Image: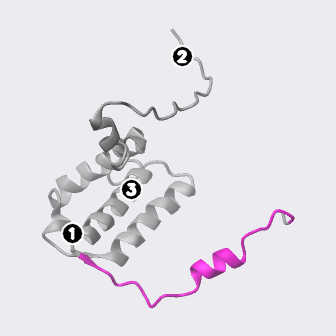
Amino acid sequence: MSQESTPQTPPKPVLGTNPKDLLGQKKVALNLVPPSSIIYQALAMEDGARKYGPYNWRTNKVILSIYVAAAMRHIMAYYDGEEVAKDSQKPHLAHALACLGIIVDAKETGNLVDDRPVAGAAGNLIEKYEKKPEQK
């Protein structure tokens, strides 16, 4: 049997009468994270756990710039046409997700060494040079 490739409209939230429904609707909607993204990240996290130990960033500080640079290298390699990292044989996007996940976890657990430079103008420049509807 083949699946039809017709787009599906997501169901509208239904307000239930169960008290748990009312509480559950106020929680973070973890079900909105695509499972494929979680699986990719887990692939790279397994590789890192094998090399460095699981959750090593919780016992050793994480230098932000190291992980930002690593994520950028993986994204650039992917963008340039390389699907899989040569050393791990895992998808570059998996490694980029893992880098970002480690940054977030280290930040939230107080293990992030934030070595970003003094704030610059990137955000303002992105907004300033955003193409307007009349521009091409």
Q: Amino acid at mark 2?
A: Gln
> Position of 22 compared to 75: left or right?
left
Residue range in magenta is: 112-134
> Position of 70 compared to 107: left or right?
right
Cα–Cα gap, marks 3 and 2 = 29 Å
Judge by depth and name the residue closer to the eye, 85 or 121.
Answer: 121
Which residue is at a point 64% across and 75% down the rendered structure image?
Answer: 126
Which residue is at a point 45% across and 65% down the rendered structure image?
Answer: 73
What residue is shown with label 1?
A: 109
Quarter assignment of residue 40: top left
Q: Secondary structure at mark 2?
A: loop
The relative height of residue 40 versus residue 108 in the rendered view (above or below) is above
What residue is shown with label 2?
A: 3
Which residue is at a point 35% across and 48% down the rendered structure image?
Answer: 26
> Position of 18 compared to 84: left or right?
left
Farthest residue, direction top = 1
Cα–Cα gap, marks 1 and 3 = 18 Å
Q: Secondary structure at mark 3?
A: helix
